[in-house]
Amino acid sequence: MKPNKPAAEMTTKELASYIDYSVLKPEFTEQEIIDLTKDGVKLGCATICINPGYMELCRPYVQGSDTKLCPVTDFPFGDSSTASRVKQIEDVAKYDEVKEVDIVANFGKIRSGKLDEVTEDLKACAEAAHKYGRELKVILETDALTKEEIKAGCHCVMDSGADFIKTSTGFLTGHDNVGATPEVIQLIMDENQGKCKIKGSGCIRTRERFLKLIDMGIDRMGIGFRSIPVVLDLKQ
């Protein structure tokens, strides 16, 4: 949805509301996770994206704030069984501190043309999240896909009843990593036609790209801790 004013005229708090603060690096210590979670809450980010094993660690730091948690499931490969994926979602969606759950689509199956299987899997995942009143964001891993495969993946998400189409994990190797470029976001918007919300992630490291994507009508962006001060133009 197009914003009601240019992104360049938004306050820091308004801009932060577009951000899912990414705290997903597996090498983070517990103290680093706590510190970054507290930083995201202080800024007023929409959510803190965490690995599911840190739910209990992070819950106390978002309580009483406008910021929620967004656990990321079956990350970063998306190739577990449907039963496992549903269980992972249910394990985290039950918490009141959770706003949304992210999950990685089985993008190998998208590349294989097994679109009905992808859709059915995502439908089960969406139902698991919705059972607890949480929205589901589906990561397509667009850097691993052709334009036609991205379009096909969008329809899998739309047909599954999931709530968001998301671009990237930020952890893909062996491919050119371009992430959430305006061109990729526009491709998804054109295919989606407003049926799902859209989250960009991956390589959003400049304020220029951040503001442009907001002006295009993106709903959310995943931003890493090093890029947060840059996109929000925070004085160090």
Image (spheres, rainbow, N blue to C red):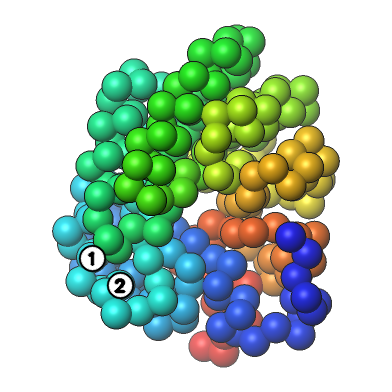
27 left or right, relative to 217: left
Residue found 79% across the figure and 79% down from its top: 5
Residue 15, percent from left and from top: 62, 76
Q: Position of residue 165 (x, y in %)?
A: 61, 42
Question: As rendered, which of 146 and 121 lies closer to the eye?
Answer: 121
Q: Return the residue nearer the eye: 26 or 136.
A: 136
Identify the amino acid type marked 1: Arg
Q: Residue at image x 48%, y 27%? A: 123
Type of the residue with mark 2: Val
Along the line of sight, the residue nearer the viewer: 113 or 120:
120
The correct choice, above or below, for 224 with respect to 172 in the image is below
The crowd level at tag 1 (other Cα within 10 Å; few <14, some 14-19, many 20+) is some
Q: Name the residue tied to disc 1.
A: 59
Cα separation, mark 1 vs mark 2, equals: 6 Å
Give the residue at mark 2. 62
Say which element carries label 1: helix
The image quarter in which residue 195 lies: top right
Dot 2 falls on a residue whose secondary structure is helix
Q: How many marks?
A: 2
